[in-house]
Image (spheres, rainbow, N blue to C red):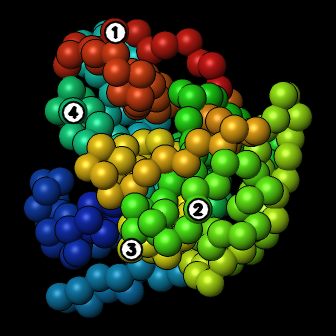
């Protein structure tokens, strides 16, 4: 049976970079800390770390096990908070995955206030433009756009996500501004390498338009910069280009015969069962941030009913 104290040693050792430092933080001698880690490895049946007198690094087995150890500790802390009263708040490590631009422009500013309101919570923000396996990587919640494809996961819609077509003034000065979907065939449209069509809505029906251009990239940030430099038309969420439009760096292109569909901003959870309190509080804070509503102060009330 796993010992929580042994799990704590592993987590602290990784965070501090050595067993001796982990022992000092937990009030243990280096010898006791080493024995606890050895006991954990014996219980798991695998070597979790490579360690010397001065350094420590995770083995592949340790890399795989660490997120689960952190989740176990976090669940225990949430349980203690639940029975000790609302004012105790949530605690533990919260692992959040999102796209690079959304994490930089939306989540990071929101998380500054969230961490101030919940001082016992730690956040690890994992940013990638690719869809990650949240269950395999021990992620508590991922922020995604559009309908959920993996039916084994649980999704909760947090907010609308207005989207549109944009281009730099320099590009529009060289090309006629498109007014209809079909005219996009004659424009340089900046897309991900695998994208060959853009989807639109027209009187309740889905319209697919083939698009292409001289530049494609597997990075949303790169496409954004290409759009700013006048390389072509981009299709982005409004939150991603709001500052550029306000400053005149990009201009919204409004088609007369169709609109870009709103895919929504979604929170994706690995399971509906035993959702930690910290996740409920994070989703509530993010929903409030996206809608412009004020968030609660440092005193935590009861967690909102799960709508995942």
Is the C terminus in the top left, top right, bottom left or bottom right quadrant?
top right
Observer-side mark, 1 or 3, equals: 3
Whether pointer 4 and pointer 3 mark residues with C-beta atoms closer than 8 Å, the reply is no
Tag 4 residue: 113
Q: What's the distance in space between the residues labelled 1 and 2, CA to CA?
A: 55 Å
What's the residue at 84%, 28% (across, down)?
A: 203
Mark 2: which secondary structure? loop
Q: Earlier in the sequence, mark 4 or mark 3?
A: 4
Image spot of residue 113 (x, y percent): 21, 33
Residue under pointer 2: 176
Q: Alpha-carbon neighbours of circle 3 within 10 Å: few (<14), some, or many (≥20)? A: some
Secondary structure category for the residue under label 4: helix
The structure residue drawn at horizontal position 26% and vertical position 90%, both measured from the top left corner, is 52
Q: Does the rendering let one see residue 129?
A: no
Mark 2 surroundings within 10 Å by alpha-carbon count, few (fewer than 14), some (14 through 19), many (20 or more): few
Q: Is residue 2 left or right of residue 302?
A: right
Residue mark closest to the camera, 2 vs 3:
2
The residue that label 1 is drawn on is 301
Where is residue 195? Give x, y as percent: 74, 69
Q: Please state which of the two labelled residues, at mark 1 or mark 4, is closer to the viewer.
A: 4
Name which residue lies at 14% across and 69% down: 21
Q: Distance between the Cα atoms at labels 4 and 3? A: 34 Å
Based on the displayed image, in which of its 4 quarters is residue 254 positioned? top right
Task: Give the crowd class for mark 4: few <14, some 14-19, many >=20 residues within 10 Å.
Answer: some
Q: Earlier in the sequence, mark 1 or mark 2?
A: 2
Mark nearest the camera among 1 and 2 is 2
Relative to 207, 51 lies left or right: left
Q: Position of residue 63 (x, y in %)?
A: 49, 73
Q: What label does residue 229 carry, if any?
A: 3
């Amino acid at each position: 049976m796993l010992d929580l104290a042994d799990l704590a040693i592993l987590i602290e050792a990784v965070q501090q970079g050595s067993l001796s430092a982990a022992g000092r933080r937990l009030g243990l001698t280096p010898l006791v800390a080493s024995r606890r880690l050895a006991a954990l490895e014996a219980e798991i049946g695998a070597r979790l770390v490579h360690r010397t007198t001065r350094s420590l690094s995770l083995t592949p087995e340790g890399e795989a096990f660490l997120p689960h150890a952190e989740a176990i500790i976090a669940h225990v802390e949430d349980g203690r908070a639940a029975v000790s009263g609302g004012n105790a708040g949530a605690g533990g490590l919260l692992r959040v995955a999102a796209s690079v631009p959304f994490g930089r422009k939306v989540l990071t500013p929101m998380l500054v206030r969230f961490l101030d309101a919940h001082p016992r919570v730690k956040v690890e923000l994992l940013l990638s433009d690719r869809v990650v396996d949240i269950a395999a990587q021990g992620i508590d919640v991922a922020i995604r756009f559009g309908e959920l494809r993996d039916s084994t996961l649980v999704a909760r819609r947090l907010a609308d996500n207005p989207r549109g077509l944009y281009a730099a003034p320099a590009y529009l000065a060289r090309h006629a501004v498109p007014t209809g979907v079909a005219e996009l065939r004659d424009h340089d449209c900046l897309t991900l390498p695998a994208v060959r069509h853009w989807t639109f809505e027209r009187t309740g029906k889905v319209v697919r338009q083939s698009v292409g251009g001289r530049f494609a990239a597997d990075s949303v940030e790169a496409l954004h910069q290409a759009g700013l430099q006048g390389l072509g038309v981009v299709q982005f969420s409004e939150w991603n280009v709001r500052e550029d439009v306000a400053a005149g760096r990009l201009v919204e292109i409004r088609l007369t015969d169709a609109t870009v569909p709103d895919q929504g901003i979604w929170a994706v959870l690995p399971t509906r069962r035993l959702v930690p309190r910290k996740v409920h509080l994070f989703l509530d804070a993010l929903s409030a941030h996206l809608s412009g509503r004020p968030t609660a102060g440092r005193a935590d009330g009861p967690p909102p009913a799960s709508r995942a």
